[in-house]
Each structure stands twice: as structure tokens, then as C-alpha cells.
Image (cartoon, rainbow, N blue to C red):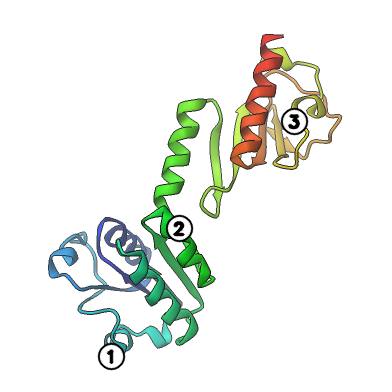
Amino acid sequence: MNFIVIGCGRVGSELAFRLNKNGHNTVVVDASREALNNLDPAYRGRIIEGNVLTEKLLEHAGIADVDGLAAVTNSDTLNAVVAHIAQAIYHVPIVVARNYDPSMRPVLEAFDLQVVSSTSWGAQRIQELLLDPAFRTIFSAGNGEVEVYEFVIPAAWEGKSLLDLLPETEACVAVALTRAGRAFLPMADTPLQAGDMLNVSATFDGIQALRTRLNSGTEA
């Protein structure tokens, strides 16, 4: 596949190297020669230095024929403009924009773009680990608004049902239960066993409610 990476900072250089290493044709564009030096020496894709807002440069990068474009500079405004041009004018099938400043995220979302906010996601993930590292995040959707968590059922919940455990909210839903190495879709009345591995899909508020319920059962 063919990809363009706009911005060659820490994120862009790593992304370009990963794509190229996996056999994809990759073009990295940055206005700074110094930034382009961030690329791993093993990178074998194309490198273009110049102003990404010029039509000539974008077409030289092959934007008319690429499968995807990632705008990952540290300027949310630049990311929004370039990503919008790629999506609206060149009809690039997959366009992803990096969000650097959380307060600017609505600007990127206004263009109906796929947005990755590393700052917001990272802060939420660290918060989760600080609050309770026993809940392991195994999948994160969007920018962490909904995540799939995995945790072990403690002995205090032996014999109680899934209905007893899950908070009465749509913000926390059971995904799978693994027992003795075999996973299945649990029902509301499924009895729990100590050592079961439960996966739930939840918002941050939903997982907080589950933590409270789980701890109250443990203390009981």
C-alpha cells in the first residue's frame, strides 16, 4: 500500500519507519531538514522537504494515488488543513489527523476526520493505571472514550452472578468470560468463579462504577 506521512517529528518518523518496514511504500514530508533526520537509518522510503500546503508538493508526494495519509505534525491547524485537503479534494480513502492540543480537538472533528489525540489518550491511560492497575486495558476505541478492560474475578465474588457484579448502567457491558482457558459469552445470570477472567467494554465512568461495585463485594 502507498502512504504519505505529513510531519517527521517523534510520531511521524516512527510511523513512517513502521509502515516502510512492513513493506509499504511510504513518503515522509516535512518543512524542516532537521526534522527529517529523525528517521531511522534503516528507513527506505521517500523523503520530501518543503511546504506541505502547496499543491505542487502534495502531488509530487503522490497524494492522488495513495491509500492513506497521516497528518501528524505538532500543529493542529496544519493537520486539520492538510487532512481536509486530502479527504475533500484528493479523496484519499484513509485520512488520520493527530491532535496535539486537546482544546483544539473540536476543530479537527469539525472536518469529520479520524482523530488520534495522544495527549488525551495518554492522560486517561495513566489515570487508569494510577487508580487501579489490576484493570488492564486491552483495546481502546476512538481516543479512549470506550475501552475493553480485563480483570480477574476475586474470591469474594465466588458464586455471585454477572448481574450482581455489573453496575446498572449501559456504560459497562460484559464482552467475554474466560474460565479454565476457554472463553464464552456470559449471560446475566452466569455464576462467577474466583479466577475467572472477565472482559468488559466500558466508558471511564462505567469502569469507575464497576471498580466501586467490585471493591464493595470484596470488602463484604
For image coordinates 23% across by 79% down, the residue present is 51
The mark that comes first in sequence, 3 or 2, is: 2
In three-dimensional space, the C-alpha distance between marks 1 and 3, rounded to whole angstroms, equals 56 Å
Q: Is 175 rendered above or below residue 165?
A: below
Q: Which residue is mark 2?
A: 116
Q: Secondary structure at mark 1?
A: helix
In three-dimensional space, the C-alpha distance between marks 2 and 1, rounded to whole angstroms, equals 27 Å
Q: Which amino acid type is shown beneath numbered disc 3?
A: Leu
Residue 134 picture location, percent across and down:
54, 25
Residue 28 picture location, percent across and down:
27, 72
Give the residue furthest to the right. 189
Q: Which residue is mark 3?
A: 166
For image coordinates 27% across by 61% down, the residue present is 13
Please say if the residues under marks 2 and 1 sit with CB atoms less than 8 Å apart: no
Give the residue furthest to the bottom. 56
Q: Is 91 rendered above or below residue 210?
A: below
Residue 93 picture location, percent across and down:
51, 78
Q: Which residue is mark 1?
A: 56
Give the residue furthest to the front. 103
The mark that comes first in sequence, 1 or 3, is: 1
For image coordinates 40% across by 61% down, the residue present is 98
Q: Which amino acid type is shown beneath numbered disc 1?
A: Lys
Q: Is residue 158 visible to the viewer in this orientation of the structure?
A: yes
The image quarter in which residue 38 lies:
bottom left
The image quarter in which residue 171 lies:
top right
Report the label total.
Answer: 3
Q: Which amino acid type is shown beneath numbered disc 2?
A: Val
Q: Which mark is residue 33?
A: none
- The local crowd at label 1, few if under 14, some if 14 to 19, many if 20 or more residues have their Cα within 10 Å, is few
Q: Secondary structure at mark 3?
A: loop
